[in-house]
Image (cartoon, rainbow, N blue to C red):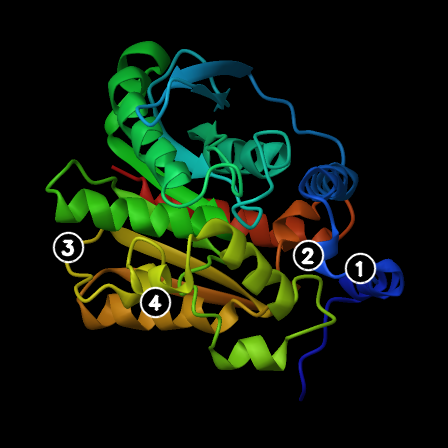
C-alpha cells in the first residue's frame, strides 16, 4: 500500500502550493523570516503553560554580540535534566519565537529544562559563525545550568530540527574530536546532515511537499561561502570519517521530505560505529511538521513519542 500524506497536512499543502509561486531566490530574506514566523505561530496553536520561561542574552566569542536564549522550566524546586535546543529554518530563518511551541512541548512532556538558542543567521553570518554560537551556548549552559537552574550536569542533551539538527550533529562531533565534555544524548529531528543535496529523496520529493529541493539548495548556497565547503564535516556531518564515541542518539525523519534519506543514512552510519541509536520515519509527515501541533492532531502523538525517547535518553 502506497503511503499518503496525512489528510490535514494535505489540506495545508493544497493551499500552500496554490499560492507559493515565487522562487526562493526572489523572496527577500526578511520577508522569508516573517513568513516562517507567521507559519510557526499559526500552525502551533495555544502555547502550553510552563512553570517558568526566562528570556536572556548570553555572550558569544565570535564577535562582540550577545545572542538571545529562552529557558523553559516545567517544574520548580527539583533538579531536572536538560535539553539544549538549536532551532531550524534553513540557516537563514528561525528564532526562539518560531520554535517556542516545540520547546514547550519537549520541556513539559519530557520533564526537562530546555534552553532554546537563537544562533546568528545567514546570509549576514555565514558558516561557521552560527556553529560557533551553538558551541558557545553549550559551554555557557554547562557552567550556568547546574548552578543557576538546578540542572543535573550528568543529564544534558543537545537537539535540533532541520538546520538546527545539522548544528547539533556538528557540535557533538566537534566535542568528541576535541575531547570536550559530551552530552548524554542527542536528538536529531528531520536534520540536514549532508549538504550535497544529492540523495534519492531529493529527486523523489523535489517539489510539492512544502520544503522543495530548490529551497534546500538555496539555503545551502546562502549558508556556505562556496560549494567546496560541502565536503567539510563541519558542514556535512554525514561525511565525517569516524563517528565512534558519540552519545546515544534518536533520529526522526518525515516520509515526504527531501532530507529523509540523509537522516536514515546517518542512523545507519552511527550503528556501524557502535553508537547506540534509534530511528523513526513518520511516513505521512512533511518537513517541519513539528510546528503543526495546533492543526494536525497526529503531530501531538508524535511529539509525545519523541519526548518519551528524550526522557529515556536522559534517564539516570
Q: Secondary structure at mark 4?
A: helix
Spot occupied by residue 307 in the image (x, y as percentages of width and height): 48, 45
Across and down, in percent, residue 270 comes to 26, 65
Q: Earlier in the sequence, mark 4 or mark 3?
A: 3
Identify the mark nearer the N-term, 3 or 2: 2
Query: Crowding near pointer 2: few (<14 within 10 Å), some, many (20+)?
Result: few
Inter-mark Cα distance, 4 to 3: 14 Å
Q: Are marks 1 and 2 in contact (CB under 8 Å)?
A: no
The mark that comes first in sequence, 3 or 1, is 1
User: In the drawing, does residue 273 fall left or right of residue 216?
Assistant: left
10 vs 65, nearest the viewer:
65
Quick one: label 1, few (<14), some, or many (20+) residues within 10 Å? few
Q: Which residue is mark 3?
A: 245
Residue under circle 4? 267
Q: What distance separates the C-alpha of mark 3 from that of mark 1? A: 44 Å
**What whole-number distance in Å separates the C-alpha atoms at marks 1 and 4?**
35 Å
Sequence-earlier tag: 4 or 2? 2
The circle on residue 50 is none
Q: CA distance from mark 3 to mark 2?
A: 40 Å
Amino acid at each position: 500500500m502506497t503511503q499518503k500524506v496525512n489528510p490535514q497536512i494535505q489540506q495545508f499543502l493544497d493551499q500552500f502550493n496554490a499560492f507559493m509561486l515565487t522562487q526562493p531566490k526572489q523572496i527577500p530574506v526578511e520577508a522569508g523570516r516573517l513568513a516562517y514566523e507567521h507559519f510557526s505561530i499559526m500552525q502551533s496553536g495555544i502555547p502550553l503553560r510552563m512553570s517558568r520561561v526566562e528570556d536572556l542574552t548570553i555572550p558569544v566569542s565570535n564577535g562582540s554580540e550577545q545572542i538571545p536564549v529562552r529557558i523553559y522550566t516545567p517544574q520548580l524546586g527539583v533538579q531536572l535534566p536538560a535539553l539544549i535546543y538549536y532551532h531550524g529554518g534553513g540557516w537563514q530563518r528561525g528564532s526562539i519565537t518560531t520554535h517556542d511551541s516545540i520547546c514547550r512541548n519537549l520541556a513539559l512532556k519530557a520533564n526537562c529544562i530546555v534552553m532554546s538558542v537563537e544562533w546568528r543567521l545567514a546570509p549576514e553570518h555565514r558558516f561557521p559563525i552560527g556553529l560557533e554560537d551553538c558551541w558557545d551556548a553549550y559551554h555557557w549552559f554547562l557552567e550556568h545550568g547546574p548552578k543557576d537552574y538546578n540542572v543535573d550536569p550528568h543529564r544534558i542533551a543537545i537537539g535540533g530540527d532541520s538546520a538546527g539538527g545539522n548544528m547539533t550533529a556538528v557540535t557533538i562531533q566537534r566535542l568528541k574530536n576535541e575531547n570536550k565534555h559530551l552530552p548524554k544524548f542527542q536528538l536529531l529531528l528531520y536534520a540536514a546532515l549532508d549538504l550535497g543535496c544529492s540523495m534519492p529523496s531529493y529527486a523523489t520529493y523535489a517539489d510539492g511537499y512544502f520544503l522543495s529541493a530548490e529551497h534546500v539548495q538555496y539555503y545551502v548556497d546562502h549558508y556556505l561561502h562556496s560549494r567546496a565547503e560541502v565536503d567539510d564535516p563541519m558542514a556535512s556531518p554525514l561525511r565525517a570519517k569516524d563517528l565512534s564515541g558519540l552519545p546515544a542518539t534518536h533520529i526522526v525523519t518525515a516520509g515526504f521530505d527531501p532530507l529523509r534519506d540523509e537522516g536514515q543514512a546517518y542512523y545507519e552510519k552511527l550503528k556501524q560505529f557502535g553508537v547506540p541509536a534509534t530511528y523513526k520515519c513518520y511516513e505521512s509527515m512533511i518537513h517541519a511538521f513539528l510546528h503543526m501541533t495546533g492543526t494536525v492532531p497526529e503531530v501531538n502523538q508524535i511529539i509525545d513519542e519523541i519526548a518519551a525517547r528524550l526522557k529515556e535518553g536522559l534517564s539516570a
